[in-house]
Image (spheres, rainbow, N blue to C red):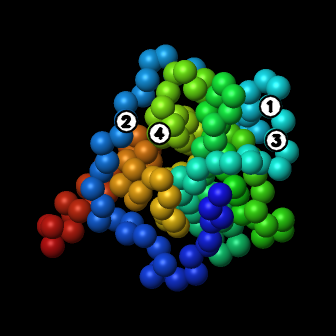
Amino acid sequence: MKRPTIPMSAEQLPQQRIVPLADLVDRPVPFDAVVGWDEKPDGVELPNGPRNADYLGQVEWTWSPMHNRIDAYYISRGRSHWMLWIYSYGDDDGWTWLAVGHVPRRQASRMQAAIHLIADFWRMERDKTELDHYHWINEQGDLGSSEWRTIALLVWPEVAAQRIAAAGNDNDH
C-alpha cells in the first residue's frame, strides 16, 4: 500500500490550476452511502486502518502557518462494502487512519464509490464544519488533478464562479 509523502516545495506538487475538468463516472442509483467521522459498516473493526487499500491521492488545507490539514485518501474493498479512508497527518501524532464513509459494493464500482464518497464526505464537512475548498493537491494517486478539481467543484461550485469572475476582471485591464 502506498504511503503518502508531504511535498516540501512547489516543484514537488502536481499541476494545480491549468488542468481540464474530468468526466467523472456517474453517481449510481441507488447509492446508499453513509459518511461521517469514524464511519464503518456494522461489525467492521479496523483500529489500525485497512490492511489493503488503493491510494487515491492527497490534498491539503493551509489556513495559517500553524493551522493546516493534510489528508491522504484511500478506498478499500470489504466483504460487502467499499470503504473510504483518510490517512491524516497531525504534528502531534503523525499519520492516523480514520474511516469516513462506506457504500454497499453491489451499488458501485470502485471508482464510483471513491469519487462519490469523497464528494459526499466533503459536502457533510462543508455543511457541519464550514470546511472550505482545499488549497493544494499534494499528490495524485488513482485520482489525478483533473478528478480532484472536478470533485471539489461539485462540492464548492461557488469557487468556480469566483475564479471565472476573477479571470474576467483580469481581462478588463
Taking the image as shown, residue 127 lies to the left or right of residue 40, namely: left
Q: Check whether the beta carbons of the residues at disc 3 and disc 1 lie within 8 A of each other.
A: yes
The span from disc 2 to disc 1 (Cα, nearest Å) is: 27 Å
Quadrant assignment, res 34: top right
Label 3 and label 4: CA atoms lie apart by: 22 Å
Characterize the local packing of mark 3: few (<14), some (14-19) or many (20 or more) Cα atoms within 10 angstroms.
few
How far apart marks 3 and 1 lie (CA) works out to 6 Å
Residue named by callout 1 = 44
Q: Which residue is mark 3?
A: 46
Left/right placement of residue 4 relative to residue 110 reads: right
SS label for mark 4: helix
The residue beneath circle 2 is 25
Q: Which residue type does callout 2 highlight? A: Val
> Which is more toward the observer, 129 or 69?
69
User: Label 4: which residue?
Assistant: 111
Image spot of residue 21 (x, y percent)? 30, 50
The amino acid sitting under disc 1 is Val
Q: Earlier in the sequence, mark 2 or mark 4?
A: 2
Q: Identity of the amino acid at label 4?
A: Met
Q: Is residue 98 above or below residue 20?
A: above
Residue sitting at x 84%, y 65%? 93
Which quadrant does the N terminus fall into? bottom right
